[in-house]
């Protein structure tokens, strides 16, 4: 085993001092780097590290771009419309296929399509409160139609006039609710 020489000890000490640095030179941040910060109104802003690295500069907040907000709302609305249009296509396709099985088959196919529409609408990422509320109401309506269609199919299969009347009334109630929902969008 060899003894460490004075040069090795000096090198180790120099590396240690370089790594630890002087306590007076500690930096709060890397000069010129940026980070996000919170602005009034829960917006995000940005702040830059000062040139000496001793502190973060003030948070710079920029008002949201109204045109970008409108584009976002239009994009989100188009995504919901696409879900509804796909649902209509699925209902038309399903009821034609279900019609081969009889009236109750077409109703069950419509119920399945409406459940899928509700599930697909729930997957659309929305940021606009108005569209979130509309989507929630639309999903509830689609689920109500699906339930009423299944109830009507079961009543038809059982040849139960009373259940059939209740299910038909439920479908009519949902249809009356749908009209204002469509006008509001």
Image: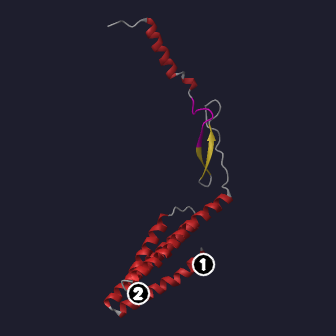
* Real-space Cα separation, disc 2 to disc 1, in angstroms: 25 Å
Q: Residue at x 36, y 83 (%)?
A: 101
- Neighbour class for label 1 at 10 Å: few (<14), some, many (≥20)? few
Determine which of the numbered discs, if any, sits on residue 78 in the image.
Answer: none
Residue located beneath label 2 in the image: 167
Total numbered labels placed on residues in the image? 2
Magenta span contains residue 31 = yes
Residue ID for mark 1: 183
First in sequence: mark 2 or mark 1?
2
Percent position (x, y) of residue 2?
35, 6
Is 60 in the magenta? no
Q: Secondary structure at mark 1?
A: helix
Range covered by the magenta-colored residues: 27-35
Pointers 2 and 1 in contact (CB under 8 A)? no
Specify whether 185 is left or right of 161. right
Q: Secondary structure at mark 2?
A: helix
Above or below, comparing residue 163 to residue 61 in the picture: below
On-image quarter of the C terminus: bottom right
In this view, the residue in front, 159 or 70, is: 159
Q: Tell me if I can see residue 110 in this picture.
A: no
Which residue appears at 50% of the width and 71% of the height? 86
Q: Is residue 98 left or right of residue 14?
A: left
Residue 145: percent from left, percent from top: 44, 80
x and y percentages locating residue 117 in the rendered image: 46, 71
Look at the image and tell me in which quarter the N terminus lies.
top left
Q: Position of residue 149 (x, y in %)?
A: 41, 82
Q: Pick out the residue farthest to the bottom.
A: 161
Secondary structure of the magenta portion, mostly?
Answer: loop
Observer-nearest of 170 and 119: 119
- Residue at 64 percent across and 60 percent down: it is 69
């Amino acid at each position: 085993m060899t003894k460490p020489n004075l040069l090795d000890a000096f090198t180790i000490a120099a590396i240690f001092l370089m790594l630890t640095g002087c306590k007076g030179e500690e930096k709060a941040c890397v000069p010129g780097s940026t980070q996000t910060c919170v602005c009034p109104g829960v917006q995000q802003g940005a702040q830059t590290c000062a040139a000496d690295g001793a502190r973060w500069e003030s948070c710079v907040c920029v008002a949201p771009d109204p045109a970008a907000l409108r584009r976002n709302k239009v994009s989100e609305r188009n995504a919901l419309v696409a879900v509804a249009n796909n649902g209509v296509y699925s209902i038309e396709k399903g009821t034609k296929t279900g019609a081969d099985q009889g009236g109750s088959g077409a109703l069950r196919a419509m119920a399945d399509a409406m459940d899928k529409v509700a599930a697909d609408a729930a997957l659309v990422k929305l940021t606009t409160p108005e569209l979130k509320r509309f989507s929630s109401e639309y999903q509830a309506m689609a689920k109500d139609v699906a339930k009423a269609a299944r109830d009507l199919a079961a009543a038809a299969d059982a040849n139960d006039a009373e259940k059939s009347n209740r299910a038909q009334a439920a479908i009519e109630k949902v249809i009356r609710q749908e009209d204002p929902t469509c006008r509001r969008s």
